Amino acid sequence: MAEAGTVRNQGSGTPAPPGSAHLEEVPPGHAAPTVLEVLRGLGSGPRGLTEAEASERTVRPGGNSGPARREASWPRLFVRSLRDPFTAVLACLGLVSAAVLAWGTTSVILLLVAVSCALRASGEYRADRSTAALRELVATTATVLRRIDEEAVPSVREIPVTDLVPGDVIRLGPGDLVPADVRLLRAVGLTVHQAVLTGEAEPVVKTADDLARPARGGPFEQPQLCFQGSGVVSGSATAVVTATGARTRFARAHDRTSLPPRASAFDRSVHGISWILIRFMLLTPPLVLMANTALRGRGLETLPFAVAVAVGLTPEMLPVLVTLCLARGAAPLARAHGVIVRRLPALHDVGAVDVLCLDKTGTLTEDRPVADRALGPDGRDDPAVLRWAAVNAWWTLQLGDLPQPDALDGAILDAVDEDELTAYDGVASVPFAPDRRHATAVVRTPGRLGGHTLVVKGDVSSVLERCALADDERERLLALAARQADSGARVLAVATAERVAHGRAYTPADARGLTFRGVITLRDALAPTAADVLKALTDRGIAVKVLTGDHPGTAVRACLDLGVPVAEDAVLTAGDVDALTGTELAEAAARTTVFARCTPEHKARITEALRRAGHTVGFLGDGVNDLPALRAADVGIAPRDAADVVRDAADVVLAEKDLAAVAHAVDAGRQAGGNIATYLRITLSSNLGNVLAMLSAGLLLPFLPMLPAQVLTQNLCFDAAQLAFAHDRPHPRVPDRPTVLDPQRLLRFITGFGVLNAVADLATFGILALALHGPGTGDDEAVFHSGWFTENLLTQAAVMVMVSVGRRVAGSRRPSPVAWAAVALAAAGLALPASPLGPVLGLTALPAVYYPLLGAVLFLYAGGLLAAGSRFRRRRGGAGPGEEKGARAAGDKGAVRPCPEGRWN
């Protein structure tokens, strides 16, 4: 990459040939190479390259084109959807059904697979098109020095950015985008905006420092380096291109995002649940065949029934319903809140998040500072200090012919009335320079004829060096400024001096013998909605972790101002993180709120440690330096104006870098996840109960307990009714806790409630055997099939009704979609046996005596459901509707409240 360092080939210890040099990062503490060493390594010079040299190098590096987009087509997304474990399980069942010539079952299953894949591919295709329409941060032309031959004088030319090669000498000015990774040769007042790379909003001072001194911090903190994608705010510079195309830091970050993504929370949950289904399905057909062969003498003729039982265990509509739930949650997010879910399962992961990692700038705070306090030398508030600071900011802006004030001067000017400034007449200014670290304005003070006032503002130590103070007084004032800085404020010093008016130009040397006036403290402007959103996220069981490159005091100050408590042991710096092992970091991260002075590697390591501790982690970032952490998190979140490579790596893209949008996404994800979890619990427990009952009946009856066509019809009726869960109106308190599909908890649930459902089925068998057997009842086999078919659909409708009642919002009288679906399911169960379709399915009308007996079974079944549901909630440590029970989440002391919307979530 393009950071200054020893000039070598990547992965080799031999010197690179001229023009293809790739400069390695300079480790902190090692000396950075000088300009001469860099130019030698690149085979270039201050006059730039010749046209022949540039043409030769164009072939070798591969051109300065940005990272290519790899947008998937709709067919490719459709094929990718087939890899979903739920869909794969269903497809395997379809193949098995085809193998036993059960063409009806095969057709229905393959249709469901196609519908599910089409829905998912369409949703993700729309999301990809939305992100592709966002603006790109790339330059189109560059100003370069080129020569016709070695003897010619270099000329300034505008060339396409794609034609730049390593060794080219370019010029940069205000408003330019840096077209490649460069090393500065000369710079005058250069400040660069690196937010696209680092996420930090404040411009960074860059210099062509050529002194032999150790490199400090990461590559972005090295003042002599600029990187592709950053923008020039002020000043001008000449620089030599050190890396282009795929070798730039920007492109290398994109390459890292091309690696296969890690398994998310949804992927892990789906994998676990799929294996549960696969085990049951592999076990069921052999059991049915062996039992019927051993006890009833039936052989392969029971194979279609065995496959139908396995199909009955599988929630055929699961892929369709999961996709519908997620798509219905993602579409309103995009329309109402500008949140684009690029990968549908990521919406579930957002709902499962219990730790959210983010930077301070742009989320907790706005991208601008505000004036906080003006303190005199005695440490007390003094408005005159703010006035003098504003006079300096105003006249250095006016006399320096700057297009706009920098962020700190703008904050000072916003804090005073303009009338206070126009009372002073500007005479001259000496603008800020990185080596002096202060700016000087010379004004005529009202009422002082023949005299000028010098107003100096800047770095505290720099200003104090120019004040007429005793050493002990200077130390006292430095300590005063240090205390303010430790509290998280940015501190500027202000001093003045009276001079006799003269006609010569003022120089930096005139700033001496100053009178110290005081200090100005500035803090980051808090985001207007941040405090309320942080409280809402905490109430929803989400612990917020601040991972920032800022001073720890600055981050802690922002948290405290927003009402986020930060304990003394809840702050770690990058040095503290480096000293911890992986296990120690996982333990420390749980109780830590602020991680300061973080590099990209620290952010990724902290995120990974939280995941290893069992948390579902979301990461909100917008700079290229956030890419490692975005990939390490379960859910990567980026704003729309982030770098292209960051948006490509993110699972969720926000219209703005706003926590409120994250909160909306969390709510939508938890509502979708809650509906999916409810469907799984109800469907799998009912299906398991039916399978257990079928196995028992197969051993007790001289005929098959249910025909394959009847099993398939029953499943289709139930699954069609279950689609209502995708349209259900969740209880308002559904978002109060993360929704995670826990395979082990789900297995315990479906086992317990499946046995209860099987007991109800066996009770129905008893009724059918005792009450309906005998003369006048007709075909015993058809009656048995019809009675059990009706009972199955009615018990499943009863479960849906109970869920619907549990989910009803207080004061709402309108039935939910689930209630209407349950009524339709019950009607189908009662009407189908006596309908013209009944004989086709092998069903017949039931005697009237059956229905009151069935009503008694349903009443006892409902009572059993209530009792089992109450026991299930107690074992989970949950509470009933209207109650709350605290639970620890993500290592903080916020309460995670259980979902109260019924017996099943």
Image (cartoon, helix red, strand yellow):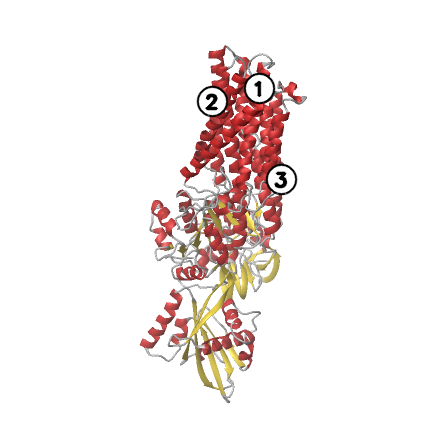
| Circle nearer the viewer, 3 or 2 | 2
Q: Secondary structure at mark 1?
A: helix
Q: In the rendered image, is residue 77 in sight?
A: no
**Residue visible at 45% across and 29% down?**
751
Question: Dots 3 and 2: beta carbons under 8 Å?
Answer: no
Residue in front for this viewpoint, 792 or 483: 792
Q: Where does label 1 land, which residue?
A: 785
**Residue visible at 47% across and 12% down?**
295
Distance from the alpha carbon under mark 2 to that under mark 1: 24 Å
| Circle nearer the viewer, 1 or 3 | 1
Label whose residue precedes the other's in the sequence (1 or 3): 3
Distance from the alpha carbon under mark 1 to that under mark 3: 41 Å
Q: In the rendered image, is residue 811 in sight?
A: yes
Query: Mark 1 is on which residue type?
Result: His
Instruction: Classify mark 2: residues with Cα within 10 Å, few (<14), some (14-19) or many (20+).
Output: few
Instruction: Classify mark 1: residues with Cα within 10 Å, few (<14), some (14-19) or many (20+).
Output: many
Query: Mark 2 is on which residue type?
Result: Leu
Direction from residue 549 to residue 95 in the image, left or right = right
- The vertical placement of 338 against 802, above or below, is below
Q: Position of residue 169 (x, y in %)?
A: 54, 59
- The vertical placement of 162 against 901, above or below, is below
| Circle nearer the viewer, 2 or 1 | 1
Distance from the alpha carbon under mark 3 to that under mark 2: 36 Å
For residue 283, which numbered disc appears in the image?
A: 2
Query: Mark 3 is on which residue type?
Result: Ser
Q: Secondary structure at mark 3?
A: helix
Q: Where does label 3 land, which residue?
A: 122
Residue in front for this viewpoint, 415 or 562: 562
Instruction: Classify mark 3: residues with Cα within 10 Å, few (<14), some (14-19) or many (20+).
Output: some
Instruction: Residue lying at the far right in this picture: please name it.
Output: 836
